[in-house]
Image (spheres, rainbow, N blue to C red):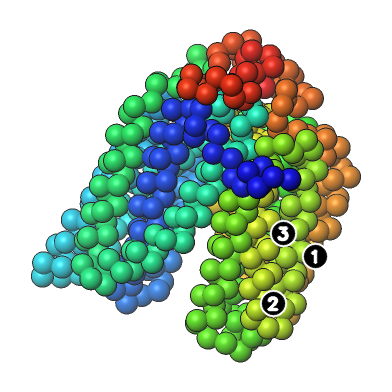
Amino acid sequence: MKLRDAVIDIGPLRISREFRLVFTARLISIFGLGFALVALPLQVYSATQSSVLVAVVSAVNGVSIFGGTLVGGVLADRYSRRALIVSGRAAAALAFSGLALNALWAQSGGGSASFAVICVCAALNGFVGTFSTVALQAVVPGLLPRERLPAAGALLALTGQLGSIAAPALSGAIVAVWGFAAVFGITAAVSALATGLVLLLPPLPPAGGDAAEGRGMAGAAVEGMRFAARHRTVGPLLLLGFVQLLFATPYVLIPEFTDTVLHAGETAAGLLYSASACGAVLASLSSGWTRRARRSGALLLTAVACCGLAAAGFGAAPHLALAAAALAALGFAEIVEEILRFALLQSHTPDALRGRVNSVWTAQNTVGGGLGALMLGALAPLIGAGAAVMAGGAVTVALVAVLAAAFPGLRAAVASGAGGPDSGADAEAAGGGNDARRPAVDAADPADPAQQSSDGQGLRS
C-alpha cells in the first residue's frame, strides 16, 4: 500500500467548496467550544466554591443538548439546513457574549459571576446550539459523492480531536493571564465567524421537506425513530454504537485507576487522557484506507470489538506504559468506528430523514456516554476499577458477537461505491422519491472519479 493511500483523504476538501465551508466552520466552532469546556466549570467553581453547582450546570447543559437534538432533528428535515446551522452558531455567539459580560462584570468588581446567568446561557447554547450539530451531520452527504463519505467522516472526526487536544490548554492559559471574560469573548467572536462562513452556503433544503411539514413535531420525531428501529442496517448501527458507549468507555475511571491500580498521581492521569486522544488523532490521519473499504459493516463490528479488547487491556494493565498503550489503541479504534458508522449511517438514510436519524445518533451519544460512566462508576467500588473496566470490555466483545449473528444486514453493509444493497428501499421508505440532484463539487478536479456517480444521483440512498 502506498503512503498516500494510507494517510487521511483530503479529497472532500478539494472537490467541494460547500464542504470546505462546513469543515472550516466546524473546526472554528470546536476550538471555541473547547475553550468554553474548560472555562465554564472553572468559572462556576471559582464563583461558588461548590462542585455540586458545577454538576448542576453540567446537567442543565446535558438536558438542553438532549432536547435540542430531538427538536433540531425534526426541524432539519423540514426547513433550510443552512438556516438551522446559522441559528445554532448565532445562539452560541449570543450565549458566550452573555457569559463574557457576566464574567467582565465580576472582574470589574461587581462581585461573583451570576450563577443564574451562567445556567441560562448554558441552556441556550445547549438547546439551540445543538440545532447546528444535527443539521451539519444531515447536510454533509448532500455535498459529496457517496465514495467520499468515509473520508468526510475522518476529516470531521479530526476536527473534534484537534479541538479536544489544543483548545483546553489554550483556554487554561488565557484564563490564567486575562481571566474568564477574555475566554468567553474569544469564543463568542469565534462563533460569530463560524456563522458568517455558514451564510456563504446555499439554502440546503431537505429532500421531502414539504411532506415532513404535514406532520406534527412529535409525529415527525416518531417517524424518524420508527425508520431507525425497523431498518436492517440503521437500527443495528445505532444499537452497536450504544453498546460501545455503555461498556467500552472507561475514561470516568481513569482517576481512580491511576490512584488505586497504578499508584500514581495527577501527571499520570493526564498522560492517560492524552494517550487516548493521540490514538484518535493517529486513526484520523491514517484513515485513507476507509475510502476503499468494501465491507464497512464487518469492519465496523471488528472496530467495536477492538474497543472492548482495548478497554479490557487497560483494565488489566499493571504499569503506566501498558495502560497508556491500551488507551491509545482504544482511541484509535473509537475513531475508526466513528468514521465507518458515519459513512454507513448517511449512506443508508434517505435525505428526507437524515435530520431525525442523526438527532437519534447525537442523543444516543449524550445519553449513552453518561449512562456508561454511571454504570462503571457504580461497579468500581464493588469489584475495583480495573475489574470493572475489564468486565465492560468483555461484555462489549460478547455483545458484538451477538449483534453480528443477529443482524446479517449489518455484517454485509457497505458505505462506498454504488451503495448498499437496500439503498433503493431506503428512498422508498422515506417517500423521498427520485431525487436527481447532484452533489456540489468544484470543476477544478474533473479527472477525480469521485465526481462521477454511478447512478447520476449523487448520494441518494
Q: Left or right of 115: which side holds 418?
A: right
Q: Cβ–Cβ below 8 Å for labels 3 and 1?
A: no
Total numbered circles? 3
**Residue 396 placement: quadrant:** bottom right
**Which mark is first along the chain, 1 or 3?**
3
- Where does label 3 land, which residue? 307
**Which mark is first along the chain, 2 or 1?**
2
Residue shown at 79% from the left, 51% from the top? 302
| Three-letter code, disc 2 | Leu
- Residue 200 seen in render: yes
Q: Position of residue 97 (x, y in %)?
A: 23, 50
Residue shown at 78% from the left, 35% from the top? 294
- Where does label 1 land, which residue? 394
In the structure shown, which secondary structural element does the residue marked by tag 2 occupy? helix
In the structure shown, which secondary structural element does the residue marked by tag 3 occupy? helix
Q: Nearer the viewer, mark 3 or mark 1?
A: 3
Q: CA distance from mark 2 to mark 3?
A: 16 Å
| Three-letter code, disc 3 | Cys
Q: Residue furthest front?
A: 2
Q: Position of residue 91 (x, y in %)?
A: 31, 41
- Where does label 2 land, which residue? 322
Q: Position of residue 134 (x, y in %)?
A: 49, 37
